[in-house]
Amino acid sequence: MSVPKSRKSRSAVRRRRSHHHMTAMNIGTCEKCKADVLSHQACTECGFYKGRQAVDHTRDAQRAIAKQQNDHAHHEHEKPAAEAPADKKEDSKEQKAA
Ligand SMILES: [Zn+2]
């Protein structure tokens, strides 16, 4: 591992650290609901962006999405799908035997 040849001066350290500050976030206000909004992002409250409804944040829409995603996640409905892999396994066994 390489080692620094000489100690950095207080000035050099401070010059380097002069860039270590953070900048304030660019926060605007939503045209529609006046909530605080990050620039270049749709409003997290109402989904409005650049004069149009970009994202549907209404509770009904969120519920519909959640229902689509969660449907049948915790249990299996279709037996053919479960049987298909079993058939493949049997095929592979037969191939090995032959
Ligand atoms: Zn809004």
Image (spheres, helix red, strand yellow):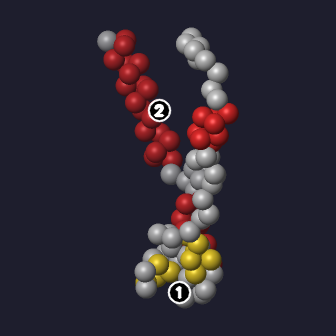
Q: How packed is label 1: few (under 14 Cα within 10 Å), some, or many (20 or more)? A: some
Q: How packed is label 2: few (under 14 Cα within 10 Å), some, or many (20 or more)? A: few
Residue at coordinates 45% horizontally, 35% vertically from top-left? 85
Mark 1 sits near ligand 1, with its Cβ under 8 Å away: yes
Q: Nearer the viewer, residue 10 or 65?
A: 10
Find residue 98 and report its horizontal and vertical position in percent: 32, 12
Q: Where's the N terminus, which quadrant? A: top right
Q: Nearer the viewer, residue 45 or 89?
A: 45
Residue pushed farthest right?
A: 10
Q: Nearer the viewer, residue 59 or 93?
A: 59
Q: What is the three-letter code of the residue carrying label 2?
A: Ala
Find residue 17 and report its horizontal and vertical position in percent: 62, 42
| 83 is higher (above) or lower (below) than 90 | below
Which residue is labeled 2 in the image?
Answer: 86
Find residue 38 and report its horizontal and vertical position in percent: 56, 70
Which residue is labeled 1 in the image?
Answer: 31
| 3 is higher (above) or lower (below) than 11 | above
Q: What is the three-letter code of the residue carrying label 1?
A: Glu
Residue at coordinates 63% horizontally, 36% vertically from top-left? 11
Q: Are marks 1 and 2 in contact (CB under 8 Å)?
A: no
